[in-house]
Amino acid sequence: MVKLNMYKILFTLFIFSTSMFAQSFHFQEIRYNNALDKSKTLEGNISFVKNGLLIDYTDKKQSLHYINAILEYTKDEKIITLDEKNAQRIKEYFDILILLHDADEKKLEEDFIVEKDAQTLLLTPKTIIKNFIKKIKLTKEKNELKSVQLILNNGDLITINISNEIS
Protein backbone atom coordinates (compact mmCIF):
# COMPACT_ATOMS: atom_id res chain seq x y z
CA MET A 1 0.00 0.00 0.00
CA VAL A 2 2.90 2.36 0.66
CA LYS A 3 4.07 1.86 -2.93
CA LEU A 4 0.58 2.65 -4.19
CA ASN A 5 0.78 5.90 -2.25
CA MET A 6 4.13 6.72 -3.79
CA TYR A 7 2.70 6.31 -7.26
CA LYS A 8 0.15 8.94 -6.39
CA ILE A 9 2.89 11.32 -5.50
CA LEU A 10 4.55 10.73 -8.84
CA PHE A 11 1.49 11.91 -10.60
CA THR A 12 1.31 14.93 -8.39
CA LEU A 13 4.72 15.99 -9.51
CA PHE A 14 3.93 15.26 -13.08
CA ILE A 15 1.03 17.63 -13.02
CA PHE A 16 2.96 20.44 -11.43
CA SER A 17 5.26 20.84 -14.37
CA THR A 18 2.60 20.76 -17.01
CA SER A 19 0.69 23.68 -18.33
CA MET A 20 -2.28 24.81 -16.28
CA PHE A 21 -4.46 24.46 -19.34
CA ALA A 22 -3.48 20.93 -20.25
CA GLN A 23 -5.92 18.40 -18.85
CA SER A 24 -4.91 14.90 -19.97
CA PHE A 25 -1.53 13.30 -20.55
CA HIS A 26 -0.11 9.98 -21.68
CA PHE A 27 2.75 8.71 -19.55
CA GLN A 28 5.18 5.84 -19.06
CA GLU A 29 5.98 4.99 -15.45
CA ILE A 30 9.14 3.11 -14.53
CA ARG A 31 9.22 1.77 -10.97
CA TYR A 32 12.64 0.67 -9.72
CA ASN A 33 12.67 -1.51 -6.59
CA ASN A 34 16.02 -1.06 -4.88
CA ALA A 35 15.68 -4.10 -2.59
CA LEU A 36 15.03 -6.44 -5.53
CA ASP A 37 17.15 -4.51 -8.05
CA LYS A 38 14.31 -4.81 -10.58
CA SER A 39 12.26 -2.40 -12.65
CA LYS A 40 8.66 -2.51 -13.84
CA THR A 41 7.21 -0.35 -16.62
CA LEU A 42 3.57 0.75 -16.89
CA GLU A 43 1.76 3.06 -19.28
CA GLY A 44 -1.35 5.10 -18.76
CA ASN A 45 -3.23 8.35 -18.90
CA ILE A 46 -3.83 10.98 -16.25
CA SER A 47 -6.65 13.47 -16.52
CA PHE A 48 -7.43 16.47 -14.39
CA VAL A 49 -11.11 17.04 -13.94
CA LYS A 50 -13.14 19.46 -11.89
CA ASN A 51 -12.39 18.79 -8.22
CA GLY A 52 -10.08 15.84 -8.89
CA LEU A 53 -8.06 13.61 -11.16
CA LEU A 54 -8.25 10.25 -12.92
CA ILE A 55 -5.39 7.81 -13.50
CA ASP A 56 -5.98 4.90 -15.85
CA TYR A 57 -3.29 2.37 -16.71
CA THR A 58 -3.60 1.24 -20.34
CA ASP A 59 -1.78 -2.08 -20.02
CA LYS A 60 -3.43 -3.09 -16.74
CA LYS A 61 -7.06 -3.15 -15.78
CA GLN A 62 -6.37 -0.70 -13.00
CA SER A 63 -7.47 2.85 -12.23
CA LEU A 64 -7.43 5.42 -9.47
CA HIS A 65 -10.07 8.12 -9.42
CA TYR A 66 -10.11 10.99 -6.91
CA ILE A 67 -13.06 13.35 -7.15
CA ASN A 68 -14.49 15.64 -4.45
CA ALA A 69 -12.08 14.10 -1.89
CA ILE A 70 -13.46 10.60 -2.58
CA LEU A 71 -10.93 7.98 -3.69
CA GLU A 72 -11.86 4.95 -5.79
CA TYR A 73 -9.35 2.25 -6.70
CA THR A 74 -10.46 -0.26 -9.32
CA LYS A 75 -8.64 -3.38 -10.45
CA ASP A 76 -10.03 -5.93 -12.91
CA GLU A 77 -13.33 -4.04 -12.89
CA LYS A 78 -13.72 -4.52 -9.12
CA ILE A 79 -13.61 -1.71 -6.60
CA ILE A 80 -10.85 -2.34 -4.08
CA THR A 81 -11.36 -1.04 -0.57
CA LEU A 82 -8.25 0.44 0.96
CA ASP A 83 -7.72 0.66 4.69
CA GLU A 84 -8.28 4.12 6.17
CA LYS A 85 -4.58 4.91 6.68
CA ASN A 86 -3.55 4.07 3.10
CA ALA A 87 -6.58 5.77 1.60
CA GLN A 88 -5.75 8.93 3.54
CA ARG A 89 -2.14 8.91 2.33
CA ILE A 90 -3.22 8.49 -1.28
CA LYS A 91 -5.67 11.37 -0.89
CA GLU A 92 -2.87 13.54 0.47
CA TYR A 93 -0.71 12.66 -2.54
CA PHE A 94 -3.52 13.47 -4.93
CA ASP A 95 -4.10 16.77 -3.17
CA ILE A 96 -0.44 17.54 -3.86
CA LEU A 97 -0.88 16.57 -7.51
CA ILE A 98 -3.79 18.92 -7.82
CA LEU A 99 -1.76 21.63 -6.07
CA LEU A 100 1.01 21.18 -8.63
CA HIS A 101 -1.41 21.17 -11.53
CA ASP A 102 -3.04 24.35 -10.29
CA ALA A 103 0.43 25.94 -10.09
CA ASP A 104 -0.12 27.40 -6.62
CA GLU A 105 3.47 28.49 -6.05
CA LYS A 106 2.80 29.95 -2.61
CA LYS A 107 1.31 26.70 -1.32
CA LEU A 108 4.04 24.71 -3.09
CA GLU A 109 6.72 26.67 -1.24
CA GLU A 110 4.88 26.03 2.05
CA ASP A 111 5.03 22.25 1.46
CA PHE A 112 8.42 21.91 -0.28
CA ILE A 113 11.90 23.37 -0.36
CA VAL A 114 12.08 24.45 -4.00
CA GLU A 115 15.31 24.58 -6.01
CA LYS A 116 15.12 25.73 -9.65
CA ASP A 117 17.33 26.04 -12.67
CA ALA A 118 16.49 26.49 -16.35
CA GLN A 119 15.32 22.92 -16.98
CA THR A 120 14.99 21.32 -13.55
CA LEU A 121 12.84 21.81 -10.49
CA LEU A 122 13.91 19.93 -7.36
CA LEU A 123 11.38 19.60 -4.54
CA THR A 124 12.27 18.46 -1.04
CA PRO A 125 9.16 17.73 1.07
CA LYS A 126 8.58 19.63 4.32
CA THR A 127 5.35 17.83 5.28
CA ILE A 128 4.53 14.27 6.33
CA ILE A 129 5.33 12.88 2.88
CA LYS A 130 8.98 13.43 3.72
CA ASN A 131 8.67 10.12 5.59
CA PHE A 132 8.38 8.40 2.18
CA ILE A 133 9.78 10.75 -0.42
CA LYS A 134 13.30 12.10 -0.25
CA LYS A 135 13.10 14.37 -3.31
CA ILE A 136 11.08 15.01 -6.44
CA LYS A 137 12.84 16.05 -9.63
CA LEU A 138 10.94 17.61 -12.53
CA THR A 139 12.68 17.99 -15.88
CA LYS A 140 11.48 20.26 -18.70
CA GLU A 141 12.45 20.71 -22.33
CA LYS A 142 11.30 23.81 -24.19
CA ASN A 143 9.06 24.71 -21.23
CA GLU A 144 7.23 21.37 -21.39
CA LEU A 145 7.42 18.78 -18.64
CA LYS A 146 9.23 15.69 -19.88
CA SER A 147 9.81 13.67 -16.73
CA VAL A 148 9.08 13.42 -13.03
CA GLN A 149 11.37 11.42 -10.83
CA LEU A 150 10.51 10.42 -7.28
CA ILE A 151 13.44 9.50 -5.13
CA LEU A 152 12.09 7.51 -2.21
CA ASN A 153 13.66 7.16 1.22
CA ASN A 154 13.96 3.37 0.84
CA GLY A 155 16.11 3.71 -2.29
CA ASP A 156 13.29 3.00 -4.74
CA LEU A 157 12.92 5.27 -7.74
CA ILE A 158 9.83 6.11 -9.74
CA THR A 159 10.24 7.87 -13.06
CA ILE A 160 7.36 9.17 -15.12
CA ASN A 161 8.10 10.08 -18.72
CA ILE A 162 5.44 12.24 -20.32
CA SER A 163 5.10 11.59 -24.01
CA ASN A 164 2.23 13.84 -25.01
CA GLU A 165 -0.89 15.73 -24.11
CA ILE A 166 -4.10 14.01 -25.08
CA SER A 167 -6.49 16.25 -26.96
Image: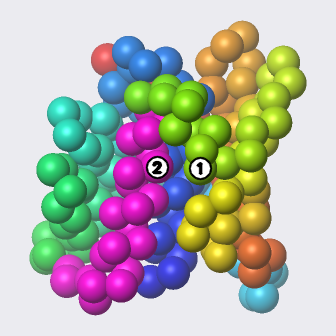
**Can the viewer see residue 153 in this picture?**
yes
User: Relative to the observer, which residue lies in front, 79 or 131?
Assistant: 131
Q: Which residue is mark 1?
A: 111
Q: CA distance from mark 2 to mark 1?
A: 9 Å
Q: Residue at x 40, y 62 (%)?
A: 92
| Numbered disc in front, either 2 or 1 | 1
Can residue 21 be found in the magenta stretch? Answer: no
Rendered image quadrant of residue 146: top right
Q: Residue at x 38, y 15 (%)?
A: 21
Residue type, numbered disc 2: Ile
**Residue at left offset 15%, top offset 50%:** 68
Percent x, y of residue 7:
51, 63
Residue 150 is situated, as x and y percent measured from the top left of the image, at: 69, 57
Q: Decide: is 134 above or below 102.
A: below
Is disc 1 surrounded by few (<14), some (14 to 19) or many (20+) residues within 10 Å?
some
- The number of discs equals 2
**Disc 2 marks which residue?**
96
Label 2 environment density (alpha carbons within 10 Å; few <14, some 14–19, many ≥20):
many
Residue 98 in the magenta stretch? The answer is: yes
The kind of secondary structure the magenta stretch mainly shows is helix
- Seen from the viewer's position, the closer of residues 11 and 89 is 89
Q: Residue furthest right?
A: 117
Instruction: Give me the residue at 28% from left, 88% from top.
Output: 83
Residue 93, picture quadrant: bottom left
Q: Say whether residue 30 is left or right of residue 167.
A: right
Task: Tell me which colouring the rendered structure shows.
Answer: rainbow
Which residues make up the magenta segment? Answer: 80-101
Amino acid of disc 1: Asp
Circles 2, 1 touching at the beta carbon (< 8 Å) = yes
Q: Position of residue 104 (x, y in %)?
A: 48, 29
